[in-house]
Amino acid sequence: MNVPVYLDNNATTPMDPRVLEDMLPYFTQKFGNAASRNHSFGWVAEEAVDHARSWVARLIGAADSEIIFTSGATEADNLAIKGVFEMYRNKGNHIVTCATEHKAVLDTCKHIEKLGGTVTYLPVKEDGLIDPDELERSITDKTILVAIMYGNNETGVIQPVAEIAGIAHRHGVLFFTDATQAVGKIPIDVNTDGIDLMAFSAHKMYGPKGIGALYIRRKNPRVKITAQIDGGSHERGMRSGTLNVPGIVGFGRACELCSVEMNEEAIRLSALRDKLENALTEIEETYVNGSRQHRLPHVSNIAFKYTEGEGLIMTMKGLAVSSGSACTSASLEPSHVLKSLGLSDDLAHSSIRFALGRFTTEEEIDFAIGQVKKAVDNQRTLSPVWELFKEGITSQIYIK
Ligand SMILES: *Cc1c(COP(=O)(O)O)cnc(C)c1O
């Protein structure tokens, strides 16, 4: 077993060695520019890109021509939202999104507001799900886009995507989803789900960093966007710039592996996740954040009340996990996602995200359980608040 044990697979995943193996020739011998039309170096690269593109498309039930390669999900989020806003300006300027989105979506929406757009940030219920009726009520005749994520990066909560798409379409509005955490983990079909645009990224699914994609529907309806990077007309003019051929090859292979392996992997990971979660919720005063039912198979986010997450993480030297705090400049802010679920600042700060992955073993889970139990126990032993709680004096100190 390698220590520290890596349970932060929602931040990034290690690359699968089979992916690396496929990529290597494209750095050295097969280094051609996929846009070079005059010689075999270019043709070899282009063929590799075409092959990869069809695996990326196949994983999500799309056509090859509906995949636009980007540098990752952040760029794909920007391209989808800004690209739709610019293209459909004459139709309207209103976008509906939700409070628990990734910063790549929320910050892009803030930018849209500076450009004169209006944005509705839907709240979520205690389980992390949006209320479809509230979504429907928020749509106006100026709405051009509904942008709601597929699976949440902090809690793993899965939104009712097909239902959301149905509501958007009933009102003639496009539906975009950031599916970075869900693609390659659970089966997704853009047609079954009614998705018009979808962002995802290779490095969250055992591929390389620096490559991702935006799916853009080409029929029923044909979705158009305004390019945000001009020059050279690569990717059908929607995203110029020399293609990252080794990255694309790796992304394609990563998608192929997920197509073949994700169903079995999901069963194995949810069993390990449940083992971890069941053991940790045996500890007094612990709470699972977000819906346990509508959730990605490999994620668990747990609040250990009367502890401080950052402190726990510092003492658990053998474990790589994330806390419910976001480091903004010098201060630790409680996670906006956990706050949206209704957690107090204290409870958000006491939360830890466990994200399992393809290479997580049962031995590592057993080790993690031991580490967390010890760390929580140690911190509470030293905590006057915990002592007061044990004496039954709680209400004035610490309320969820
Ligand atoms: C990681 C992540 C992103 C950013 O992806 P990059 O490829 O690193 O830019 C965006 N959205 C979600 C939900 C993510 O988890």
Image (cartoon, helix red, strand yellow):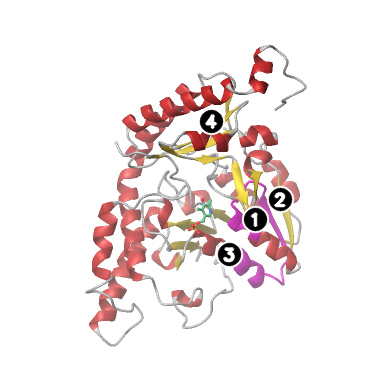
Question: Which amino acid is tagged 4?
Answer: Arg
**Is residue 163 placed above or below 378 in the rendered structure?**
below
Q: Position of residue 223 (x, y in %)?
A: 56, 66
Q: Is residue 89 magenta?
A: yes
Q: Can you tell which quarter of the image residue 109 is in?
A: bottom right
Q: Residue at x 49, y 78 (%)?
A: 237
Image position of 377 (left or right of 54):
right
Q: Which residues are magenta?
A: 80-107
The mark closer to the camera, 1 or 2, is 1
- Disc 4 packing (10 Å; few <14; some 14–19; many ≥20): some
The answer to whether residue 88 shows anywhere in this view is yes
Contact (Cβ within 8 Å) of mark 2 with mark 3? no
Name the image quarter holding the N terminus.
top left
Q: Which residue is mark 2?
A: 121
Measure how far apart labels 1 and 4 are at the Cα level.
25 Å
Measure how far apart labels 2 and 3 are at the Cα level.
17 Å
Q: Which residue is mark 3?
A: 78
Relative to the observer, which residue lies in front, 19 or 262?
19
Question: Which amino acid is tagged 2?
Answer: Tyr
Helix, strand or loop status at disc 4: loop
The circle drawn on residue 106 is 1
Q: Nearer the N terminus, badge 2 or badge 3?
A: 3
Relative to the observer, which residue lies in front, 90 or 16?
16
Q: Which residue is mark 4?
A: 292
